[in-house]
Amino acid sequence: MPNWGQVLKEIAEAQPPLDMVRRRYLKELAQRRQRNVIAYY
């Protein structure tokens, strides 16, 4: 897993920034834990 600085850099470079990065890390977390992930905003 990346550190906070790496995540912020990735968000700044991505198009569309936040949604793409958020989905990627939620998917990675679900695969790693082998469970569904629920994120509350």
Image (spheres, grey):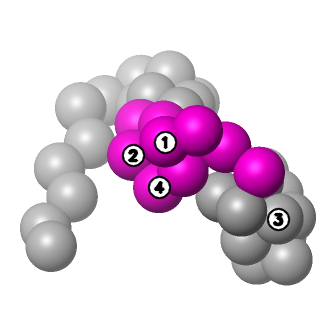
**On screen, residue 33 above or below 21:** above
The residue located at (49%, 42%) in the rendering is 16
Q: Is residue 38 left or right of residue 16?
A: left
Query: Which residue in the protein does label 1 denote?
Result: 16
Secondary structure character of the magenta stretch overall: helix
Query: Which residue in the protein does label 2 denote?
Result: 19
* Residue 4 percent location from the top left of the image: 76, 77
Is any part of residue 21 visible from this angle? no
Query: Which residue in the protein does label 3 denote?
Result: 9
Q: Residue 21 lies in magenta, yes or no? A: yes
- The residue lying toward the viewer, choosing from 36 and 4, is 4
Query: What kind of element bears circle 3?
Result: helix
Pointer 3: residues within 10 angstroms few (<14), some, or many (20+)?
A: few
- The residue lying toward the viewer, choosing from 27 and 34, is 27
* Residue type (three-letter) at the residue carrying disc 3: Lys
Q: Which mark is residue 18?
A: 4
* Residue type (three-letter) at the residue carrying disc 4: Leu
Pointer 4: residues within 10 angstroms few (<14), some, or many (20+)?
A: some
Contact (Cβ within 8 Å) of mark 4 with mark 2:
yes
* Residue type (three-letter) at the residue carrying disc 2: Asp
